[in-house]
């Protein structure tokens, strides 16, 4: 007599393979966790954000900020007697290789022509670049999200008016707008300059957010929110915007990278941060005449300008890949390595 299907002894947990238990007990991961796993899987992006944070924290801890002093003994405004002709005292060659050993010396980055410590000045320039990057990025992102969300959600006349205003600003080169803003507000310091530049840097992200809202506003969950009586503001900020955060975050990082280069260019041209404060672009501009005789005055600020911009761009690329649902570099097959392929039963 044949045994009915489904009858028979139930296998004990010890008889079930461990991989089948893991597959049966697995819970689908949330979208946020998948994004985090994709970003962590991007080694270049993770290394970039770590190095970026180390550089910024190092600059603030070295010379301090405001009334808080740092561990470095010289200030960026302090005049000192020139030592060794202002040459850098940084040594990275060990003694067993014929060098002076690994040491910073009194002035590791050298001194400028009037005796100021170039290490402290470079750290101050990094501080201002980081401050402009964050403040400008936040203001431009907030304004761009608001304008793009309103235009994409309401469409019609509202969309037409807001996009025409956006087109007027977007056709003017950023350097031209920055020069006018810097001429008026550059002498007031990096925070004020960053705030004013942020008011003229929102156009690109506004167009991207508008496109996302035009697509998302037709989805079923938006219609359900309208039927439930949700207000327009609640639908925009509680239902649609969270689904567009990928575009917002990626665009914000790209704006921050552009902010570093914009501030550097304005300071180099004399329309950005002014003396006695310091920026990386101003350091290069102030020492143009010493390019042949003391090239290290260009090496340090130039190296940090390129490094900061590249690191922020690498982080932005990693975020873009993490938020992109069509991402291919992150292999989902690794998450299912413990799940065996089902075997088809063969009839006798």
Image (spheres, grey):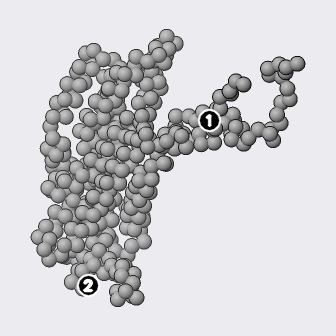
Residue at screen point 27% across, 48% down: 259
Q: CA distance from mark 2 to mark 1?
A: 72 Å
Residue 278's label in the rendered image is: none
Residue 100 coordinates in the image, percent (x, y) = 35, 87
Residue lying farthest front? 348
The earlier-in-sequence mark between 2 and 1 is: 2
Q: Which residue is mark 1?
A: 341
Q: Are marks 2 and 1 in contact (CB under 8 Å)?
A: no
Quick check: 327 left or right of 24? Answer: left
Residue at screen point 37% across, 64% down: 59
Residue at screen point 27% across, 20% down: 159
Label 1 Cα neighbours within 10 Å, binned few <14 / some 14-19 / many ≥20:
few
Q: Is residue 331 above or below residue 92?
A: above
Viewer-proximal residue among 176 and 52: 52
Q: Is residue 169 above or below residue 226?
A: below
Residue 340 coordinates in the image, percent (x, y) = 64, 38
């Amino acid at each position: 007599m044949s045994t009915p299907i489904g009858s028979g002894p139930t296998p004990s947990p010890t008889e079930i393979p461990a991989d089948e238990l893991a597959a049966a007990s697995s819970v689908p991961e949330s979208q946020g966790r998948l994004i985090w796993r994709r970003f962590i899987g991007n080694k270049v992006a993770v290394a970039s954000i770590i190095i970026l944070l180390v550089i910024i924290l190092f600059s603030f801890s070295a010379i301090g900020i405001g009334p808080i002093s740092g561990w470095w003994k010289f200030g960026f405004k302090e005049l000192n007697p020139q030592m060794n002709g202002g040459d850098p005292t940084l040594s990275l060659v060990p003694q067993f290789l014929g060098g002076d050993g690994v040491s910073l010396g009194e002035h590791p980055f050298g001194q400028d022509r009037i005796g100021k410590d170039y290490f402290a000045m470079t750290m101050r320039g990094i501080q201002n670049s980081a401050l402009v990057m964050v403040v400008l990025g936040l203001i431009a992102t907030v304004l761009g999200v608001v304008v793009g969300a309103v235009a994409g959600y309401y469409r019609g006349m509202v969309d037409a008016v807001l996009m025409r205003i956006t087109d007027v600003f977007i056709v003017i080169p950023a350097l031209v707008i920055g020069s006018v803003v810097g001429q008026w507000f550059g002498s007031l310091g990096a925070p004020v300059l960053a705030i004013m530049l942020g008011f003229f840097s929102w156009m690109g992200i506004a167009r991207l957010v508008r496109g996302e809202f035009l697509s998302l506003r037709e989805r079923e969950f938006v219609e359900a929110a309208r039927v439930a009586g949700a207000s327009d503001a609640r639908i925009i900020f509680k239902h649609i915007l969270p689904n567009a955060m990928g575009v917002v975050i990626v665009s914000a990082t790209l704006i921050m990278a552009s902010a570093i280069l914009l501030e550097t260019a304005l300071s180099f041209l004399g329309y950005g941060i002014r003396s006695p404060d310091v920026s990386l672009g101003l350091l290069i501009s102030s020492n143009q005449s010493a390019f042949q005789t003391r090239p290290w005055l260009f090496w340090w600020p130039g190296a940090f300008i390129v490094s900061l911009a590249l690191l922020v761009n690498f982080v932005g690329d990693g975020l873009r890949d993490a938020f992109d649902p069509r991402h291919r570099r992150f292999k989902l097959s690794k998450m299912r390595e413990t799940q065996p392929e089902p075997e088809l039963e063969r009839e006798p």
